[in-house]
Amino acid sequence: MHVAIVGNGIAGVTAARHLRKLDSSVRITLISGETDHHWSRPALMYVYMGHMRWEDVKPYEDHFWPRNRIDLVRRWVTSIDVEGRQLHLDGARTIPFDKLLLAVGSKPNKFGWPGQDLRGVSGMVSLQDLQAIEAASVGLKHAAIVGGGLIGVELAEMFHTRGIDVTFLVREHAYWNHVLPAEEGDIVGEVIRAEGIDLRLETELTEIVDDGTGQVGAIVDSKGDRVEVGFVGLTAGVRPNLTVCAGSPIATDRGILVDRTLVTNVEGIYAAGDCAQVKTPEGHRDLIQAVWYTGRMMGEVAARNLLGASDEYDSGTWFNSAKFFDLEYQVYGYVPSAMAHHQLPSLAWISPDRRHACRLVETEDGKLSGISVLGIRMRHRVCERWIEEGRDLAYVLAHLREAMFDPEFYRRWDRDIVAALSGKVAA
Ligand SMILES: Cc1cc2nc3c(=O)[nH]c(=O)nc-3n(C[C@H](O)[C@H](O)[C@H](O)COP(=O)(O)OP(=O)(O)OC[C@H]3O[C@@H](n4cnc5c(N)ncnc54)[C@H](O)[C@@H]3O)c2cc1C
């Protein structure tokens, strides 16, 4: 059997590795237009900032692929011939397959802004984006970033380390408030401003202005301000990459539609990672999970199912982490954002210096729904266990110390949190 995998990100590569582990005879072809070899996308900023070299962000040595008989093809897939079971690639090449995995990742959102295709305008997702940002940084004095979130703040930090001024436009009234509760969003906004970034909340991009040579020269925002900039970073979120499905019968919605076994509506064709939209039972929102660890989990499930199993994907208790300059953030389980329609009862503690915070959220029947922390590290396994065991907030506070993970000699915050919140927990 020949399995073709489109995309050499974490989902595609995990699937390829597990296919080989499980079956020594299956033929595996891994195709990507972006790079010859798999690399760690979350490490992109560290390459720019000089903390890591390009070689350091490739998790596997180049000899790993031939040794495991995984054929690498560096090409863009232009279309899928579902009936004829073959892929069309640029350069007029075709690759036949028996089974196919689409692991084509995300694309940065663009909202049709005037000037969005000028030179000096880029997202920050691919190696090519990194190269464009690197090239634009030479002699750059001022950059604009459009869209709050994790990638926007990373780009702001990158420019900041090179002394490039940043004007940062964020449509919402608090930072990342479709994910963070309002108070945490405010703290993150304060941290970004304290670094000297010109963060403009409730401000949208109106136009990117051509300097007369096809290169960005300035931006105009929704408040009518014009800022002279030499680069614009578009970081207003990402969406599943559906391009490869165009003209094929593979069903798509916001993502490539798959059931829990990750199969699409076409037998033998699967999707995994950022590009997949996993259908859920009636009344629940389908899952589109654009994070590293879920891509890896989906890749494993896809590998087993490509070989004939019918395992169901289950991401378990949600986890995410991020860094806003030096401020670390972690969330376990469900903590409603400022914008969530359905708020749940929660207890929040914020340190007097506003650089540490902890929030415990309760389900309607009094069980722990989620925990989030800023400037504090917690033990993943402990938080996950409390949520899975349905512990109540009184139990969580009584055992909070078990979850604290701050390194030795760092101030521990559990006593402050317990002292502030214990009196507020229903007996
Ligand atoms: C800057 C940045 C920082 C991030 N930081 C974090 C983090 O800290 N933690 C976290 O959990 N997640 C983070 N993420 C998200 C995480 O990187 C993604 O969720 C993950 O990489 C998705 O993996 P994937 O395999 O689904 O897709 P991708 O890694 O996007 O890989 C898809 C591959 O398919 C290729 N491809 C697409 N179309 C075609 C085609 N037609 N033909 C050939 N090849 C094609 C693409 O070029 C790409 O190489 C970050 C993302 C970015 C951009």
Image: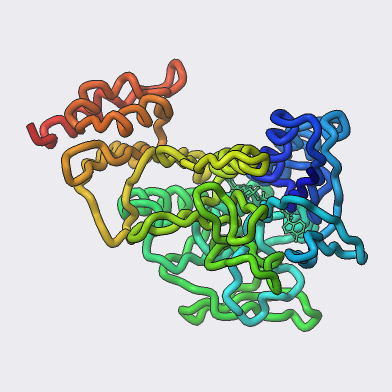
User: Observer-nearest residue: 134 or 369?
Assistant: 369
* Residue 188 point in image, percent of width and height: 42, 49
Q: Residue at x 60, y 80 (%)?
A: 207
Q: Quadrant of the N terminus?
A: top right
- Indicate the colouring scheme: rainbow
**Observer-nearest residue: 291 or 268?**
268
Residue depicted at 55% across the width and 56% down the height = 258
**Does residue 11 appear in the picture of this structure?**
yes
Res. 38 image quadrant: top right
| Residue at 81% in and 49% down | 35
Q: Is residue 210 above or below residue 103?
A: below
Percent of width and height locating residue 245:
68, 66
- Give the x, y percent position of residue 419: 18, 27
Return the residue nearer the eye: 187 or 106: 106
Quadrant in the picture for residue 415: top left
Viewport quadrant of the C terminus: top left
Asked if one can make out residue 52 in the rendered structure from this viewpoint, the answer is no
Q: Is residue 119 left or right of residue 154?
A: right
The residue positioned farthest toward the left in the image shown: 427
Q: Position of residue 410 (x, y in %)?
A: 42, 21
